[in-house]
Every structure is written in C-alpha cells, then in structure tokens.
Amino acid sequence: MQDLDVFLTASVAFIITFLAIPVVLQIADRKKLYDVPDERKLHTHHVSSLGGVGVFVGAMFALLLAVQGTVYPEFQYFFAAILVTFFLGLKDDLVALSATKKFIGQIMAAAIIIHLGGLRLSSMYGLFGINEIPESFSLALSYLTIIFIINSYNLIDGIDGLAGSLGLLCCLVFGTYFLIIGDTGYALLAFAMSGSLVAFLIFNHHPAKIFMGDCGSLVLGLVCSILAIRFINIANTPNINIALPAAVPLAISVIIVPLSDTIRVFATRILNGKSPFSPDRTHIHHLLLDRGLGHAAVTFILVSANVVLITLTYIFRSLGPTWTLAGLLTIVFGVVGTLYATRPRRRLVVAPKAVGEGAELQTRTSRVLSIASSLKDKLKIDQN
C-alpha cells in the first residue's frame, strides 16, 4: 500500500508539472519574463527562468493530497518553509534581490524547520569521535547545514539539466531508503519532488526551453536538506530495518557534487581576496566545459561520478564515519583539484598594428589580446 501511495504521488507531481510548465512558458512569452542573455550567460537567446514554478506547484499539490498531517505534523512547517523559499526565489527571478535579503530569507526558512518542525542535527553520530553535542552547537550546525545545502543547489544550477539531475538523484536515493524502512511521509516528499523534476527535465535538457531559476533551485536545495538531516537522524537508529552507522558520510556522498563544489569555490575566492559570491569560471561544470564537453556530457559525467561516490561510500562504510568521510573528500578534492590545476590557460597573441599602403614608414606597435576575453564576449560565458 505504501508503494502504491508513493507511485501515485510521484505520478500526480509529474503530470501537474508537465502540464504546468507549458502554461508558464506561455505566460513568460506574453509578459516577456525572460532570462536575457548577457556577457555572463551561456545561452544566446531569451529563455524563461520560471521552471521552478512548475516544479513547486506539482510537488506541493501532490504532497498536500498524500501526506497525512496527523501522522506527520511537522510537514505543515516544512510546507511553510518551502513556501517562504519559493517566493524568495521567485522575487529574485523577477526582480533581483541582494545577497543579504536572500540570506535573511533562507535563515527564516531554516528557523521554521528547526524550531517549529523540530528537525535538526542533535548528534555527530561518531564522526571525529563525537556523539552528543550541546544544544547551541546543534542549532548552529543545523542552520549551517540547511543554508549551505540550499546554496549548493542554487550555485550548481549553471548548465542545462545539471541541478535537476543531481536533485533527482538525491531525492531518489533518500526516498528509496525511507520507503524501505517504512518512513512513508519523507518517502512521499522525496518522490513527489522526483516526479516534478523528471517532468521539468523534459523541458530543461540542452538546449533548454526553460530554466529552473532561483524559485526552483532554492526549493530543491531546501527539500534536499530536509531529506539529508532526516536520513542522518533516522539511519543511526538501531531498531530500524536497515541501520547505517556511517550515515553522516553516506548523506554527504549523496549531495557531494554540489556541496564540494560550493566549498571549494567559496574557499578559492576568499583565499584570493574576493567575495565568496563574486562570479568566476571555477565551478566544476565550467572546468569540464572548458575541455570542450557539451552540457549533456558534463551533466552525465557529474551525475555518474556522484553515483560512483555513493557506491564507494556505502561499500567502505565499515571503516567508520571519520575514515569513510576522509576517503570520500580526498577522492573528490583530489580529482577536482587536478581538473583545476590542468585547466586550459589563457593564451596571449601579439597582433601587429596594420600600416596603411603607401604611408610613411612608421614604428610598428603591437597590442596584446586575451583569447579568453575574446571568447567570453562571443560565447557570453556564464560566470555563476
């Protein structure tokens, strides 16, 4: 019966999102609600960035039909937090918001989940030899986790299909686990989002007809943070069907691609004396694009790599949470560091200044042209 509920919820979410996105496209076309290409964008034509509206409508409608509030009372607060995040992202898609306002909105959503929904990290579950932690540290860690995961999916949304595919992988992995152990409410949350994402990806594959936008990526990040914290808390419970003592590194492995990319990019910018939110071309998808790969190839490589990392983490979970996490991070940052160190460098070309025919002899001057800068103007590269 649980399997049928999950299937129906995912199906309803898929159908509503699939039907809603063409309507969003029509409205965006009439009202000229486009993501206009400029020197920071990869796309060269007007594309709507309101795909998250369809994802939100489909997933939330299906959940409201399926989740029983008496069994999962915390879900009313999850819905409220998702609503806050959705309208925060929607306003940013329509009228650009400052980083400060977005951060405040994310704190509000996290506060609803932590204080009203009662979902937070209350233990390190053996990571670094630590188990129970003080309440103040628990609150700080929970806020940091939710806000960081939200921004990770927001920042990884740089090419067609990438954020949606990684989010789909996250929801399917966590949702399957919740379904197996009988945690139906969270399984419904995961599969409702999965159904909506599948429908969205039909319109988002390269060349994309519509983008997810902040209203979609922020909601996706919030849902993934809820699933990750729930997984960490419940997978360490000894009396469930499948107990996973190394739940912390396993949860991290599921979201490792957007999470590690955000950590590395932020650290690199700060070490270079820049704002962590300043745009550049150091995201993992940029490093792969610079090697001549297309959007579909980059998305396939990163999703496949994420699957491999989840599998390796599960296989070596018996090493304990600390060593398992250390091995996972070593592999990830080792590979990405190699890609970053061997990325194509900017080349300089010296072009002599033309001398008119029949003109008096002049001293020829030269000018230095940056090929990378020239390509940036032509290709309108997105600096996320």
Image (cartoon, rainbow, N blue to C red):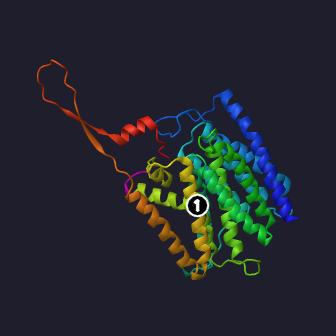
What residue appears at the point 62 percent right and 77 percent down from the top-left corner? 246
Residue 358 in which image quadrant = top left
Give residue 154's position: percent from left, percent from top.
58, 51
Locate residue 202, reporting x and y percent: 68, 45
Tell me the residue at 58%/61% (across/down): 304
Check disc 1: other Cα within 10 Å, few if <14, some if 14-19, many if 20+.
some
Q: Which residue is mark 1?
A: 304
Q: Where does the N terminus fall, quadrant-wise?
A: bottom right
Furthest toward the left, the residue is 361
Q: Amino acid at mark 1?
A: Ser
Could you say which quadrant of the image residue 138 lies in? Answer: bottom right
Instruction: Please state the extent of the stretch shown in magenta in the rendering.
Output: 271-276
Specify whether residue 374 is painted magenta.
Answer: no
Judging depth in this view, the residue of 9 and 349 nearest the camera is 349
Residue 19 as seen in the image, left or right of residue 104: right
Examine the image and state in which quarter residue 357 appears: top left
Q: Position of residue 287 (x, y in %)?
A: 45, 53
Is residue 69 something one can see in this rendering? Answer: no
Which type of secondary structure does the marked residue at label 1 adopt? Answer: helix
Side of 13 where 372 appears, left or right: left
